[in-house]
Image: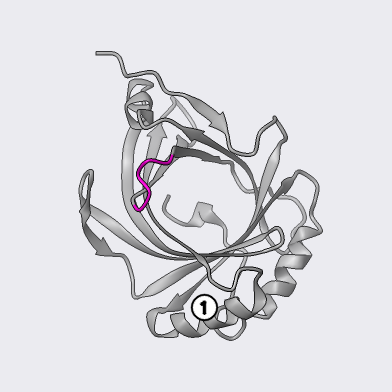
């Protein structure tokens, strides 16, 4: 049986090669409120956006090399909004003195038939999780503070288990290739969050996808 057609639209529009600049860290549950208070004082939005998302990670294995990975995410709190399909490239080697991890990023919105479409294309669901938390913004900077929970029964987002006793903290900027000065701005912002959280340049190749 053929999968239903899927419509895909770029979130940012155009065909600009966008790069994601990223710093990551974590904060224990008991320190969350202190971090949120600090972010309210530093960011443009006094009250953060909140979200509850379900993300599915798909793999397409080739005959050689690393598998091709796509991430499909949709909102559980706003189920009518489009799904998002995201591709994240391998981190650039680049200048070792660069303060942030840099990788190619493609993010598009898609219809609700996206999972069926990916299965039809030969992708295999590797794992899925639920992320809920807060989003702060300061100019082009975005700070996401999220709690991650594994999905215990495939497709059942009501049956989850928290992965840790901490929140993941991610500071990121989307910018055209070559805008490496944004990493300096990110480092300056990250310094203002110490000692509540230490944001670092983490190599995802050393982590499980």
Q: Colour scheme of this structure image?
A: one colour
Q: Single out the residue that lies furthest toward the top.
A: 1
Q: Residue sitting at 42 percent across and 30 percent down? A: 111
Measuring from the top left, give residue 77's x and y in whole percent: 35, 53
Q: Nearer the viewer, residue 13 or 181?
A: 13
Measuring from the top left, give residue 64's x and y in whole percent: 47, 29
**What's the magenta bit mostly, secondary-structure-wise?**
loop
Left or right: 6, with 156 as reference point: right
Measuring from the top left, give residue 3's x and y in whole percent: 31, 18
Q: In terms of secondary structure, where does tag 1 sit?
A: helix
Q: Residue sitting at 32 percent across and 46 percent down? A: 127
Q: Nearer the viewer, residue 165 or 173?
A: 173
Left or right: 27, with 120 as reference point: right
How many numbered marks have been drawn onto this rendered protein structure? 1
Residue 188: say if magenta.
no
The answer to whether residue 86 is above or below residue 100 is above
Q: Quadrant of residue 149?
A: bottom left
**Label 1 sits on residue:** 36
**Number of other residues with Cα within 10 Å of mark 1, as a class: few under 14, some 14 to 19, many 20 or more:** some
Q: Quadrant of residue 14?
A: top right
The answer to whether residue 121 is above or below residue 141 is above
- Which quarter of the image is occupied by the N terminus? top left
Measuring from the top left, give residue 41's x and y in whole percent: 63, 80
The answer to whether residue 189 is above or below residue 114 is below
Q: Residue sitting at 65 percent across and 72 percent down? A: 43
Q: Nearer the viewer, residue 78 or 18?
A: 78
Left or right: 4, with 182 as reference point: left
Q: Magenta region: which residues? A: 77-81
Q: Residue sitting at 80 percent across and 46 percent down? A: 178
């Amino acid at each position: 049986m053929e999968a239903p057609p899927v419509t895909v639209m770029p979130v940012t529009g155009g065909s600009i090669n966008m790069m994601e600049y990223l710093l990551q860290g974590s904060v224990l549950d008991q320190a969350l409120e202190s971090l949120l208070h600090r972010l309210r004082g530093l960011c443009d939005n006094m009250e953060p956006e909140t979200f509850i998302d379900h993300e599915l990670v798909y793999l397409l294995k080739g005959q050689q090399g690393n598998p091709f990975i796509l991430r499909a995410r949709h909102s559980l709190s706003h189920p009518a909004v489009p799904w998002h399909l995201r591709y994240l490239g391998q981190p650039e080697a680049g200048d070792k003195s660069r303060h942030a991890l840099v990788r190619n990023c493609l993010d598009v919105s898609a219809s609700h038939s996206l999972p069926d479409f990916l299965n039809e294309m030969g992708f295999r669901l590797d794992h899925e999780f639920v992320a809920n938390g807060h989003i702060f913004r300061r100019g082009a900077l975005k700070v996401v503070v999220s709690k991650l929970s594994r999905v215990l029964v495939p497709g059942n987002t009501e049956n989850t288990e928290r992965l840790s006793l901490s929140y993941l903290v991610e500071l990121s900027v989307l910018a055209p290739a070559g805008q490496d000065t944004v990493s300096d701005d990110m480092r300056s912002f990250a310094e203002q969050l110490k000692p509540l959280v230490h944001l670092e340049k983490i190599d995802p190749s050393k982590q499980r996808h």
